[in-house]
Image (cartoon, rainbow, N blue to C red):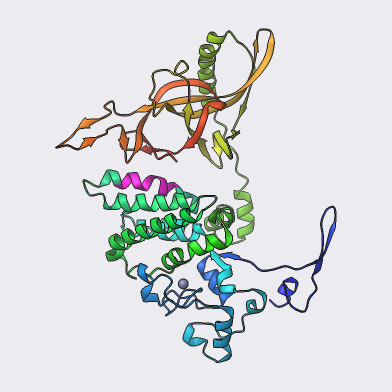
Amino acid sequence: MKILFNTLENNNITGVDLKLPFRTLTNCIFKLLTIIADMPEASTYCLTYKSYNCKYPCFRCLTPLDKFNCINSVGNYEVRTNQTMKNLYENNRSQEFLLIFLYNIFWDYSDNIYKACVTDRMHQLDLELFKRMITCLKIFNKGIFRLSNVTAAEYRDMIKIMLFVFYKLENNNNDLSNVYAKFTKMYIMSRSNSFTTSDLELFKEISQQWALEFLRLFFQYSVSNLQLPKLHVWLTYTEEVIKEFGSLNGYSTDTYETLHKFYVKNPYNRTNKRNALKQISIMSDFMLDFNNEAIEKKISILRKCWKHFAHEEKLLFKSATIYKSAKLKKLNYNLIIRADEDFYGKSYYSDTEITMTIEQSGNYLTEDGMYYGKCILLLEIMFIRDDKIEKIEMGIFQWYDYAANVSKVLSNQNEIEDERHVLGCPYLKLLNSYDLVSLENINRIVHIIPDFSRGWYYDAGR
Ligand SMILES: [Zn+2]
């Protein structure tokens, strides 16, 4: 470790020269700012005990384990610092405070190693707290052993649908959908790119509201009484971490972990463990299956749509190039829209919200002047208008409409029920009608979640 960190900031050293393509920087001093890690890894760097059953399992502070499920105790206990922990070590009191009896080299190389370790959102929310909300319920009657192979991306897909699953299951008792709704609200907010002071306060409030609900509902199902280290870390430090290092999106291990799971862990599990590397390398050379029938169908839809589109404007078709994805520049962010039969092994057709003028639209729904459509083909079309060649980026969209016709019905007493919406989101069905729409008309990408029982769709939007 000492050799490894020789280049890091240290009193004895004047820095190293850093060769860049066009110039050389002299006397560069490296500083250890942050370590992105899961909790056990963070404990390794901090040399604290990894066991979640010890007295002080948190690598950042001395909150006792039995206070981990107590929201009021947040921030009430002493935090670990380089100096205090070093003193404990020198006075032979490491054991009492669950420190491994070793000199921690990071005391010399970091201002505060306990603060520098940051656990990322994926490990805390996707893979731990959200997983808890599913496993506690035992809704999988054949057990949940397969959940150990679920990636964070797949958990994120589950986050999108769970709210609606429970809404369907519960009759007049919306406890579960409420706790999932609060979780989703917190999760969406945690993905913001920037936070103002008031955003942070709101975020803290939402997190606490969710935690209260979570503890109230799931307490009885948990063997550990929900004394979860990650719950403690999430509630206690997230705000501080955002203040110190900025939005949570900046330090995430999602990509590396997903790639590792997809290309290494899962293929390894499928081998017979003998000469595994060779077996894995064969597995990743799989052939892509190109579905001709689907393309044929789309081309015929394109013909019909173009006929309709060109008829109004008297355009002559020249050629078209098909794309799998397109980037649209919106005010201050990029929108990626996809129509891809094979996006990492799965089909991916973006659901979008579209703004159109009344003359352009057919007889589909409008949600405050917005239309919903699934993009099934992306293309750039060259055509001739008044003897001049022009081109336009377009998509073929399959339209959604409200699944229910009644906008508002009067149910018992004075309560007004809106059949067109579920939990504030439009309740949709996919129509068998298509149109060519210019990509400029796309407002945003939405999540439309299938309701398998009746073949209808929700828009979980935003
Ligand atoms: Zn702590």
User: Is 406 in front, or is 226?
Assistant: 406
* Vertical comparison of 164 with 255: above or below: above
* Vertical comparison of 61 with 344: above or below: below
Residue located at (31% from left, 35% from top): 421
Residue located at (36% from left, 69% from top): 72
Give coordinates of residue 151: x percent, y percent.
49, 53
User: Is 76 in front, or is 82?
Assistant: 76
The N terminus: image quadrant: bottom right
Give coordinates of residue 183: x percent, y percent.
38, 53
Q: Which range of residues does the magenta coloring cover? A: 157-166
Apparent side of residue 217 relative to residue 302 in the rendered image (left or right): left
Name the outermost residue toward the right.
Answer: 23
Q: Main secondary structure of the magenta part?
A: helix
User: Is 166 in front, or is 113?
Assistant: 113
Q: Which quarter of the figure has residue 395?
A: top right
The C terminus: image quadrant: top left
